[in-house]
Image (spheres, helix red, strand yellow):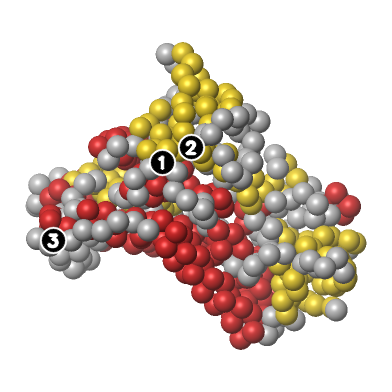
Amino acid sequence: MAYDVVVLGSGPGGYVAAIRASQLGFKTAIIEKESLGGICLNWGCIPTKALLKSAQVFEYIKHSKDYGIEASGTADFSAVIKRSRGVADKMSKGVTFLMKKNKIDVIMGFGKLKAKGQIEVKAADGKTQTVEAKHIILATGGRSRELPSLKIDGKKIIGYREAMVLPQQPKSMIVVGSGAIGVEFGYFYATLGTKVTIVEFMDRIVPVEDEEISKELAKNFKKNGIEIMTSAEVTSVDTGGNGVKAKVKTKEGEVTLEADVVLSAVGVSANIEGIGLEELGVKTEKGKITVDKYYKTNVQGVYAIGDCVPGQALAHVASKEGIICVESIAYSEKKYNHQPEALDYGNVPGCTYCTPEIASVGLTEKQAKDAGYEIKVGKFPLSAAGKASAAGHNEGFIKVIFDAKYGEWLGTHMIGYNVTEMIAETVVARKLETTYHEVLDSIHPHPTMSENIKEAIEVAYGEAIHI
């Protein structure tokens, strides 16, 4: 079985790379140990959004009187989980269709680098086969990171996979970590009635976001009954009783929290063990595969993309890395007419899908100041936005940051209703090196949420109309 390109892993990095390779005329195969679509489609991006949508619908029902509607209902936890799994299954079947459409061979099993240009694939029944390829792309993804004091047992100490398919809703939960995974699950379970406590090691939740975003989300979460402990560390967890007892070290001293279950949401570890890196001498550093800007490893013919390489562990990043990697290979073989542009990791959008949503790209206010920029900052409250008020979601704001000297758009940070659908405007504008006056000269439709980006820019330049 010989191919031009073989991709190890079928997540949003792997399957996209395989499709692009096939489009460019390469004989392509993809190796997957579990389900097509990888973690994102089966256990991450897609099913979590289905869970969050159920929580939002339930929230609407609880507040239906605010919309002039009399409605009541209860959340059927098992039905919510079942719907989420159905959405994931449908999307995974969609990837199966795309593989057939693009004439990509799918080889099920655990793949391991065997020798130069060779991967050994072990199927579920124990049978092995060797697949040969001129170019091998590693897209093995990641998994829940484990802390020494927080070993996941799948029952009382769980990761995101278990959190999506719990047999019954816990009455109480401790969420350790407040990145996207932590706050999304925290919101989901709290909305359905679980008592949630979030424990964050840093001094604020969603610590990678702009400080004002963190404050706004914390205020909203506390208002909705979610307890938040920052500058706090779980030092040990006792799972001996019916539930769990977690010892938490804080600035004020040690406290003990009790709950039914602990969700570990402290980040992602790359899946690089057991795939033959050592046998071929593929270099790694700090648990990630070392690559150049076109995702070549130090070993000829071996490439790596997605969560197993340095950079943001995001589905859309993995997809773009896969495309750049394959196009670069095609360029070197004269199957593509130009060398692709390297990915600008400074212009990658991040989205968090709790309620209120968070979306951001570029520099935070602190980062811009630390970088030496003289800046103009505009902040438009969604309480002044017509569409937000009509939707019953006027919490949050849009914040934009510009370089005062040249008008460069340095960053955008948003929290509120539907903001994840709006961040692409900033990404494209920054890519095109658009200045503030060009955005202000572009008509934004009214009433929409997206027009509030323009409103924030008006604030930054002293031209605000609506506040």
Is 400 located above or below residue 450 in the figure? above
The mark nearer the N terminus, 2 or 1, is: 1
Label 2 with label 1: CB-CB less than 8 Å: yes
Q: What's the distance in space between the residues labelled 1 and 3, CA to CA?
A: 27 Å
- Residue at the far front: name it: 242
Q: Quadrant of the N terminus?
A: bottom right
Query: Three-letter amino acid code at disc 3?
Result: Glu
Residue 193 seen from this side: yes
Rendered location of residue 438, percent (x, y) = 26, 61
Query: Three-letter amino acid code at disc 1?
Result: Lys
Circle on res. 171? 1
Circle on res. 278? none
Left or right: 411 as drawn, with respect to 301: left
Rendered location of residue 434, percent (x, y) = 34, 59
Secondary structure category for the residue under label 2? loop
Circle on res. 70? 3
Q: Residue at x 12, y 56 (%)?
A: 65
Q: In which quarter of the view is residue 57 placed? A: bottom left
Q: What's the distance in space between the residues labelled 3 and 2, CA to CA?
A: 34 Å
Task: Rate crowding at label 1 as few (under 14), some (14 to 19) or many (20 or more) other CA atoms within 10 Å.
Answer: some
Task: Rate crowding at label 3 as few (under 14), some (14 to 19) or many (20 or more) other CA atoms within 10 Å.
Answer: few
> Which residue position holds label 2?
260
The mark nearer the N terminus, 3 or 2, is: 3
Left or right: 196 as drawn, with respect to 112: left
Secondary structure category for the residue under label 3? loop
Rendered location of residue 370, percent (x, y) = 42, 32
Rendered location of residue 414, percent (x, y) = 31, 49
